[in-house]
Image: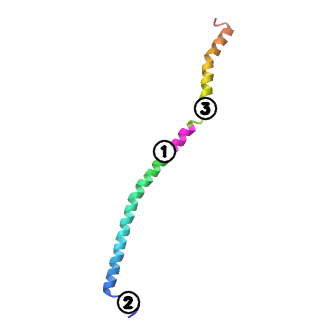
Amino acid sequence: MSVLAISTGSAILAWIGLVLLLVVAVVVWGLLENVRRPVAEIDRYASDILQAGVGIATNLDGAEQLVKTHALATAVPDLAVAYLKKLGLLR
C-alpha cells in the first residue's frame, strides 16, 4: 500500500468535510456581506456629515467681522444726519 492510498470511507469523509467547508465559507461570506453593506452606507453618511460640517465652518470663517459691520452700520444714521445738516438739507 502506498502513502497516498486511503480507504473509501476516509475519502468520503474527506469530501464531506470539503463540501461542509465550502458551505461554511459561503455562509460566512454572506454574513460578512450583510455587515459590509450597512457599514458602507454609514461611511457615506459620515462623509456627508463631515462635508456639511466643513461647509458650515467655512461659512463661519468671517463671523468675527460681524462685530465691525454692526458698529459701522449703527454709525451710518448719525453720519447721514450730520452730512445732511452740513449740506443744509436738514436743520
Please give the name of the residue rendered at 57% of the width and 39% of the height, measured from the top-left corner. Answer: 58
SS class, disc 2: loop
Q: CA distance from mark 3 to mark 2?
A: 85 Å
Tell me the quadrant of the picture where the N terminus can be found.
bottom left
Please give the name of the residue rendered at 60% of the width and 34% of the height, measured from the top-left corner. Answer: 62
On screen, residue 67 versus residue 31, left or right, reads right
On screen, residue 17 versus residue 45, left or right, reads left
Contact between labelled residues 2 and 1, with CB atoms less than 8 Å apart: no
Tell me if residue 13 comes above or below residue 66 in the rendering. Answer: below
Where does residue 35 sit, x and y in percent of width and height?
Answer: 40, 58
Picture quarter containing residue 2? bottom left
Q: What mark, if any, has residue 64 been given in the picture?
A: 3
Q: CA distance from mark 3 to mark 1?
A: 24 Å
Task: Assess whether residue 52 is covered by the magenta stretch.
Answer: yes
Instruction: Judge depth for marks 3 and 1 and give the one in front.
Output: 3
Q: Earlier in the sequence, mark 1 or mark 2?
A: 2
Q: CA distance from mark 1 to mark 2?
A: 63 Å
In the rendered image, which residue does mark 2 sit on? 5
Q: What type is the residue that disc 2 sits on?
A: Ala
SS class, disc 3: loop
Q: What type is the residue that disc 3 sits on?
A: Glu
Q: Which residues are magenta?
A: 51-58
Q: Across the whole image, how many numbered discs are drawn on residues?
A: 3
In the rendered image, which residue does mark 1 sit on? 49
Farthest left residue in view: 9
